[in-house]
Image (cartoon, rainbow, N blue to C red):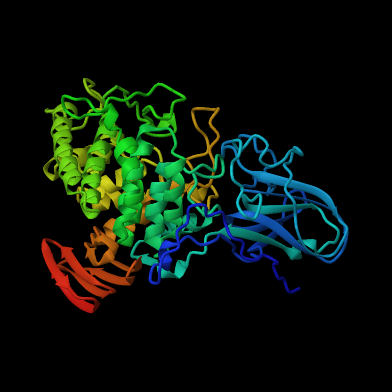
Amino acid sequence: MAYKTKCVLVASVLASATVFGAGHEQFAPKAVVCGGAIAPVSVTTNARGRVLLDFGKHAFGWLEANVCTTGKYTVIWGELVDDGGSVVTNRRFTVDEGTIRCACTRGEFTRTGLQRIPYVNADNSAYFGQNEPDGAPVGPFGTVMPFRWAEIIESPAPDFWRSIRQIPVWYPYDMNEESFCSSSAALDRVHDFCKYTIKATSFLGRFVDGDRERLTYEADSLIAQLGSYAVSSDYGLPRQTLDWVSDHSTWPTEWKQYFVRMCWLDWMHTGDTSRIRRYYDLMKERRIWSDCARASDGLLVTDWVKTKDRNRPRDIVDWAMCYRDGFVFTHVNSIVNALRYANLRDMSEMAKAIGKDDDAKMFGREAERVRHAFLEVFVDGKTGLVRDGEGVDHFTVQGNAVAVTSGVLPSCMRDRVADYIVRKGMSCSTYMAQHVLEALCLSGRIDDALALMTSLGERGWLAMMEKGATITMEFWDLTLKEKWRVPDMNHAWSTAPLNVLSRFILGVSPLESGFAKISVKPQLGSLSFVRSKVPTARGTLALAVRNTSVSYEVELDAPADVRFEAFGSIRELPSGHHMFSVSK
């Protein structure tokens, strides 16, 4: 039977969208779309004798059926199945796999033709009953839910299952712009897993934390923004997110600090200073927490006690709490002060970009003052490690990793920190994995970073896939020490390997804003080859590197001028095709 979906493009709510002139289409947000009708990749009969449809991957969307025969039906669909092949029906039912999503519809088809199967929970309540905060968005297509499986309990005809399709909703990324292939099959799997996540979690037309809350948190958005840049030169979704979060900031101290980096990244990738100009005063007055800076040395004095006042700092460090590695909270916290240094440095560069030279100098001086104070207050003289806070002799992978990624630690101090991170491994959440992997790469520990990305252990991306995930999960597992915390299976803040591969293994980043000049600094570690396409604002960069015992054999197609660096050698290359060798 031929199947045609009735989905049409529907404009998403783009309240603050800006339409740019010719040549800037990749900066303007697009509407989310229906991704077409997806047929099951397998059809089986489960232990209860019911037809079970597997659509292959999780997606936010709904079920449709092309009905040929009227009659009663009952369909359950959701994110996981039990050992007997039945969709787990109670979204509050917690087993080893954790709390999962499902929906159930019992009804009657009174007409034939293409029909969307409506949402009802297995307990006959509305799907969002207690799942969504008041006013939470559902998107231009109405209620959508993440699911992979559908179980046919009752149907109007024996072959009813043949007409059922999964209808996904997502941002219209061109996923062919980017590709990655390496000598590690496991690494390629992790890349593909994270890449699909960026697309699959874009259903609202901006980045959100996942299905559990559907809120645009800055930490989630920053990692998703980096992932989006890795796979697409369409910068509309990151920009839409930036505009949204400017007016809908969330509570943690660090999350507000990330807004500054989001603006800096937007400028570096687009070459356009409009967001810097629009949000400059907001960043200067409210996002860098200058009102909390200690007069004596510029370090932030913050808190970790719960408050309803979102204009007061409340540190989070890592999430969930069981992933904090025993971090000791103090009023002078190493993580928020490492991020303060990064904020001041970024503000100095952005102020200069929009002609505020006096501010640029002021931010630069303050950054150096904070850096000096940071090294004095937080770095332990014996171990060379970063303390959690002032006056505390306790160290965590979180505090040390962020000290490296923020740039506050000089390169000569990174070795001891990297050794510590390697010993500790992923003693952190999937969110903090971004800082851990970055810190290792910035310290030259490429193989250690690769080992974590391809780990077979419980805290790894391969383990997520073994649990049935096709979108990266909120946490390493769906079972937490905090029983009240309900995680989900669809968080883009767990996609760190995607941007780490692009920015550090391939080493592709804008050297000048808007990719007017491109930096290419591949670091393959023990990988014997990589082949890739990397999208930029100037076009696609193609890079292939063969790693021999004595050299890198490089083939490069560049859409703009390139500075290529490897093994201490620097080559200035014009746009175009290049083949060369770099000796080790």
Classify residue 534 by image quadrant. Answer: bottom left
Residue at image location 19% in from the left, 32% down from the top: 385
Closer to the camera in the image, 213 or 412: 213
Q: Is residue 507 visible?
A: no
Q: Position of residue 309 (x, y in %)?
A: 44, 26
Classify residue 122 by image quadrant. Answer: top right
Quadrant of the frame with the N terminus: bottom right
Classify residue 457 by image quadrant. Answer: top left
Residue at image location 33% in from the left, 27% down from the top: 327
Number of dots carrying numbers: 0
Residue at image location 23% in from the left, 28% down from the top: 387
Placement of 380 over or under 91, stated as above or below = above
Q: Position of residue 96 (x, y in %)?
A: 57, 36
Placement of 213 over or under 46, stated as above or below = above
Q: Position of residue 582 (x, y in %)?
A: 15, 69
Asked whether, in this view, residue 320 is left or right of residue 344, the answer is right
Closer to the camera in the image, 355 or 450: 355
